[in-house]
Image (tube, grey):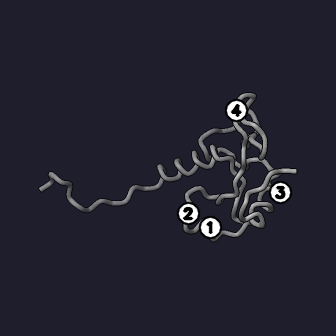
Amino acid sequence: MKSQPLAAVATWLPVMEAAGYRCQCSGECGNAHAKTDGRCPREHDGYTSKHGHLVRLMAAPADASTPPARAVTLPASDLRAWCPECYLAATRRARAQAAPPADDAPGLFDL
């Protein structure tokens, strides 16, 4: 039996079953996952390597740029299974690719 989170199991479980308890990242993290046919090989309750750590998948928005306040309202159909490493890298990439806000205020020394 696979381990489950302490909360929101009713949301988490359908996402994991649909993903086959495997991370659904297909390169959004910046890694092409070329050795595993374009999909992250990490599985829930598996290990990252022989001396690695235990993988606990999470159900998170399919679009990594979704703000957290909106993410908690999404239905299970809009979520994907992510390993923590892929999700963190994907959210960092999404933030970096977002256009920086226009700064119309003058700088401290721009008088």
Q: Do the residues labelled 1 and 4 touch (CB within 8 Å)?
A: no
Q: Which of marks 4 and 3 is nearer the N terminus?
A: 3
Give the number of the disc on residue 68: 2
Which residue, given by chain and number where applicable, does mark 4 sit on? 52
Q: Which amino acid does label 2 sit on?
A: Pro
Quarter where residue 53 is shown: top right
Q: What residue type is labelled 3?
A: Glu
Question: Relative to the observer, which residue lies in front, 1 or 91?
Answer: 1
- In the image, residue 95 sits, relative to residue 8, either above or below, namely above
Which residue, given by chain and number where applicable, does mark 1 sit on? 72
Q: Where's residue 107, x and y in %? A: 20, 54
Q: Earlier in the sequence, mark 1 or mark 4?
A: 4
Q: Where's residue 84, x and y in %? A: 64, 47
Q: How far is mark 4 from mark 2, CA to CA?
A: 29 Å
Q: Which of marks 3 and 2 is nearer the N terminus?
A: 3
Give the number of the disc on residue 17: 3
Q: What residue type is labelled 1?
A: Val
Q: How far is mark 4 from mark 3, CA to CA?
A: 24 Å
Q: Helix or strand or loop: what does disc 4 sit on?
A: loop
Quarter where residue 102 is shown: bottom left
Question: Mark 1 against mark 4, which lies toward the viewer?
Answer: 4
